[in-house]
Structure formats: C-alpha cells, structure tokens
Amino acid sequence: MTKAIILAAGKGSRLKGYFNIPKCLIRLGKNKESILERTYKNLINSKIYNINVITGYKSYEIKKNFKGKVNYIHFKDYKKSNNLQTLLSVKHLLNSELICLFADIIYEKKFIKKLSDNKKKICLLIDTSNVLEGTMRVKIKKGNIQDIGSHIPVSEGDGNFIGIAKFSNYGSNLLKRYLVKQKNNYKDYYTLALRKMNDDGIKINYIDVSSSYWKEIDTNKDYIEAKKIIRQIEGK
C-alpha cells in the first residue's frame, strides 16, 4: 500500500510578514480550505490512507487537523536545517512505496493518480512549460532527469520540479541510502540525494504536467497568484 509523506516542517520565512501560521494552513477558495486540507483530500481520493505529516514550525497548529486520520511526526531541528534533514528524520518510513510532497503547493488532484499508476523506481512531477526563478529547476537528457536543484541557471533549465515525487519500494530504500550519506548536511533540500543518484547512473524518471495547474507558495506574490488560480478553477 502506497504511503504519503508531507514535508511541513519549514518556517516559511518569506511569508511570515503576512501569515503567522505554517504555510500549509493558508486557506484558499470559496470554502477556505487550507493547502493541507486540499492535499489530504487529493490523497484520500486516490486511496492513499497512510498519510504522514512531518511538522516543525508551530506544529501544534498543524496537529489540530485530521486527528486520528494522519500520523504526525515532529522534527525538532527544523530551525537549523532544510528538508533533507526533515526527510532523513523519518528514514524508518522509507521502506516501501511512497509519494513525497512539499506541503506548500496547490495542484490538480489527478497528479496523485498519475504518480500512483507509474511503475518506475523514481518519478518526479515536473513542468516543462516554464523555467522559473526560486524553484527546483531540472535538466533533462534522453527522457530522464539529468540534474535537479536551484543551482541550475534559469537559462539552462528544462523545467521545474513541482515538489511531488513517487518512489517504488526499491526507490524508497535507495532514497534512504543516499540521504544517510548526507547525514551531516543541514543546508540542502532532499533533492540533493536525487542528484547524487544520477551521478551514480541511477535513472530518475518524470511525468510532465505542463498542461495542468500547480503553484508553490513561498511569497505573498505566490499567494495572490494561487488565489487567482483557485478562483478560476472554482468558477468553472
């Protein structure tokens, strides 16, 4: 059975002047659903019930949601590290098929079903329609991810990683192995492990979601754009 890991430990410092809550609790749309609620529904609709939320900043606010329906795990070192350490802190969960999600994204619910049906060892959702600043950019070669990270110049990127990835049973254990190799790294995203895998010849597959909507919410500008996207979707 596929499990989900939602990385929700970050402080969201670029939004703290506008919101005094974790980013995943920002509410959007007519029903004022939080980003976390939207992801929870998307996972449940795809029959993924083993949902694990890794908390950090104001974890008590997040834990008010879905009591008894998700597993909450607190990452105490969230203030001094990035999400590589967040994911490494739950390495005991990296032992079977899983979908790993950033907690601050809105996206079409069909994305989860697309990933669930994918049988590759590792598969990322990417958008090749635009290469953006402030995102995890990717480079593609021969149908696979060749490189990933914000170090890739916009002019050299082939798309953006949207923050959702699937790992098969084998891929999940690979991820754990490569994260452990970076156990003293407190500054990088977990995507560094994917870069290291690629360096060792491990193929990183992808699904292009260019024709669909998604938005990572890091800044107030992102929040305003996300509100517009949800308005357009709900207006249909």
Image (spheres, rainbow, N blue to C red):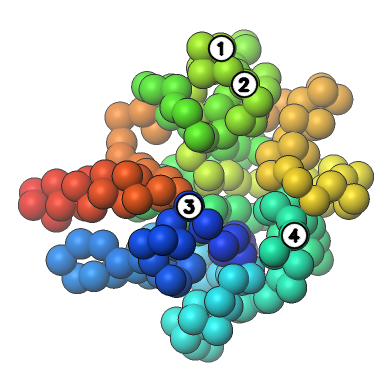
User: Residue 208 location, x and y as percent?
Assistant: 44, 28
Circle 3/circle 4 CB separation < 8 Å:
no
Circle 2/circle 1 CB separation < 8 Å:
yes
Using a 10 Å C-alpha cutoff, classify the residue at mark 1 as few (fewer than 14 neighbours), some (14 to 19) or many (20 or more): few
Q: Nearer the viewer, residue 223 or 139?
A: 223
The span from disc 2 to disc 1 (Cα, nearest Å) is 7 Å
Q: Which residue is mark 3?
A: 14
Mark toward the start of the polypeptide (3 vs 1) = 3
Mark toward the start of the polypeptide (3 vs 4) = 3
Q: How many marks?
A: 4
Can you tell which of label 3 and label 1 is closer to the viewer? 3
Question: Which secondary structure, mark 4?
Answer: helix
Can you tell which of label 2 and label 4 is closer to the viewer? 4
User: Residue 120 location, x and y as percent?
Assistant: 64, 36
Identify the image quadrant of residue 24.
bottom left
Q: Which mark is residue 80?
A: 4
The span from disc 4 to disc 1 (Cα, nearest Å) is 31 Å
Question: Which secondary structure, mark 1?
Answer: helix
Q: Which mark is residue 152?
A: 2
Q: Considering only vertical position in the picture, is 25 above or below 70?
A: above
The residue depicted at 51 percent of the width and 35 percent of the height is: 135
Q: Considering only vertical position in the picture, is 46 above or below 137?
A: below
Q: Which residue is mark 1?
A: 156
The residue depicted at 30 percent of the width and 29 percent of the height is: 211
The span from disc 3 to disc 2 (Cα, nearest Å) is 22 Å
User: Residue 32 location, x and y as percent?
Assistant: 23, 70
Mark toward the start of the polypeptide (3 vs 2) = 3
Q: Considering only vertical position in the picture, is 115 above or below 12?
A: above
Can you tell which of label 4 and label 1 is closer to the viewer? 4
Mark toward the start of the polypeptide (2 vs 4) = 4
Q: Considering only vertical position in the picture, is 222 above or below 55?
A: above
Mark toward the start of the polypeptide (4 vs 1) = 4
